[in-house]
Amino acid sequence: MMARTTSADVEKLIQVDSSIDIDAFIDDATTVVDEYLLSSGYSDALLEKIEKYLTAHFISMRQHPVVEEGFGDDSVS
């Protein structure tokens, strides 16, 4: 299926480094939404928002990778 969101919509949510290909991340988010949510009965408007925020999340993780994370006594590096 075609992407529901656009680069411009994603850039309204997150500042994207100029070296990042936003469309590649949109393609990944579209695949996830199509595979797991297309038959869910959610409206197109909600699927577009999920795709947009998922794209922004993927880009954020690429631009600012987690170096160390912890919860209680447990941590991961």
Image: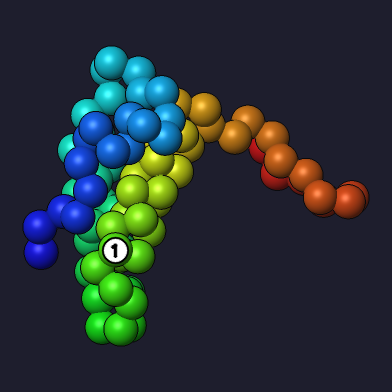
Left or right of 67? Residue 18 is left
Residue 36 image position (x, y, % from top left): 32, 74
Mark 1 Cα shell of 10 Å, populated few (<14), some (14-19), many (≥20): few
Question: The C terminus is located in which quarter?
Answer: top right
Determine which quarter of the picture holds residue 2: bottom left
- Residue sticking out furthest to the top: 18
Q: Residue at the spot x=32%, y=37% of the render? A: 10
Say which residue appears at 30% left-offset and 83% top-offset.
Answer: 41
Mark 1: amino acid? Ala
Q: Residue at x 29, y 63 (%)?
A: 45
Kind of element beneath mark 1: helix
**42 to 62, vertically: above or below:** below
Front residue (pair 46, 33): 46
Q: Is residue 17 visible?
A: yes
Horizontal placement of 35 versus 16: left or right? left
Q: Which residue occupies 89% across, 50% down?
A: 73
Task: State how many labels appear.
Answer: 1
- Residue with the mark numbered 1: 45
Based on the displayed image, in which of its 4 quarters is residue 48 positioned? bottom left
Which part of the image, by quadrant, shows the N terminus? bottom left
